[in-house]
Image: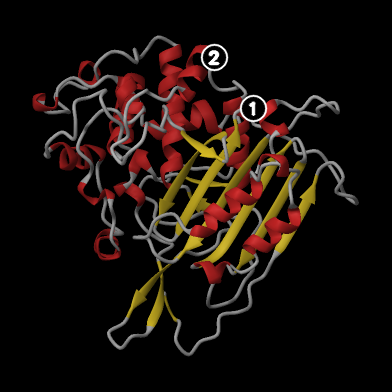
Amino acid sequence: MDVPRRGMRVGAAVLVVGFTGAGVGAGEATAANDVVYPPGTLEPALSRLASLDRAALRQVIVSPMDSGATAAQVRVSGAEGRWLGTSGVADLRTGAPVPADGRFRIGALTQTFIATVVLQLAAERRIDLERPVQHYLPGLLPLSLGPVTVRQLLDHTHGLPPVPHAVRSASWFFEHRFRRWSPRELVALAVSGAPRFVPGTRQEEGDIGALVAGLLIEKVTGRPYGQAVRERILAPLHLRDTSVPGHDPTVPGPHARGYESVAERDGATRQVDVTEANPSWAWAAGEMISSTADLDTFLVTLFRGGLLPPEQLEDLFRVPDVPHVSGGRAVHSAGLTRVDLDGLSLWGRSGAFPGSTSGMVATRDARRRLVFSLNTLRMDEARPALADRVLRAVFAPRASQT
């Protein structure tokens, strides 16, 4: 569906905000994922943050179109209760409001699920993180690339060349959006190139590590990686909004539609509906669908050791001490990214899919958590500024530390 922008007035943004938690007033409740903490027991990370400013959050997301997005869903959970906010429109043609329980494509957040399953298999001694991937998947990677350990695969220090379409342009997407890709085809496209660096010496995030990890899960378990994710994570946590779609191009259940802003030759701009697409070109690196509620449940359970024993939970947060290819030191662990904000270390993951940008971020103790989805209009742009404004509004430091 094409929605012309010139000469058409898009309906006014709709803001719906829900509150639950201590001090909210009528209808207050404690979020199901949270424990009740006695007064005065704040852990260091939470004690360094300002009280959650709900008015500031409302203001940040009230007009997503001003920031290049058609819709926003934001969920903040933790020791201070829960805040839910939606804004924008779910459909540019009808002006329908954004559903608070809307589902969306989570992009690279899929890789946190992948890493969790690999670490579970490591805990079961079915995978050795220090053993080369070539031991489990002989012939998948050319000998010229050298041995790559499973740990290096997870923490992006593998040095494998990227998938050629990893930086996806709108033109590439429109040409291939309904094509069926096989994971081995994607890996073959990547490893035909030269290695980026000697494994273990630098860090560079990309899709190739998760693609190989997905194949590793399938080799070790003898079943599709999606089945392993469903049996090990989705079913035990009752994540009913979360799915591994395979070749299904649709988004099931309530959702906001995604669009791409396309310039015409005459200078006009139209919004092309990109909601439906075969996600197999992302596969284990970014095909999953979820909701803010399900991702919050996954995040808090993961951080609090509900999915991994202590040794593997430590692996989840271990960042290798190597340089990052873009400068500075490494920031990615096995499935997560460390975000340093005003001197406070946060942990989470960001993801993107045509028409959508999403993220999940939390303090290490999981006592303040953020999950969001933004329906962005340009798939070739970096993470939108609106995402950073939401992040800073949720994790603002106490005034004495500014």
> Quick check: marks 2 and 1 in contact, CB under 8 Å?
no
Question: Can you tell which quarter of the image residue 400 is in?
Answer: top right
Residue 236, visible in the rendered structure: no
Residue 333, visible in the rendered structure: yes
> Where residue 289 sits: x, y (%)?
48, 47
* Lower position in the chain sequence, tag 2 or tag 1: 2
> Where residue 304 sits: x, y (%)?
62, 24
Q: Residue at x 54, y 59 (%)?
A: 386
> Could you give the CA–CA distance between mark 2 and mark 1, rounded to whole angstroms?
16 Å
Q: Amino acid at mark 1?
A: Asp
Question: Can you tell which quarter of the image residue 96 is in?
Answer: bottom right
Which residue carries the number 1 mark? 365
Which residue carries the number 2 mark? 309
Q: Is residue 119 found left or right of 75 in the rendered image?
A: left
Q: Is residue 356 above or below residue 190?
A: below
Quick one: 110 or 357, which is closer to the camera? Answer: 357
| Label 2 crowd (10 A; few <14 / some 14-19 / many >=20) | few
> Where residue 349 sits: x, y (%)?
48, 40
Q: Residue at x 50, y 58 (%)?
A: 385
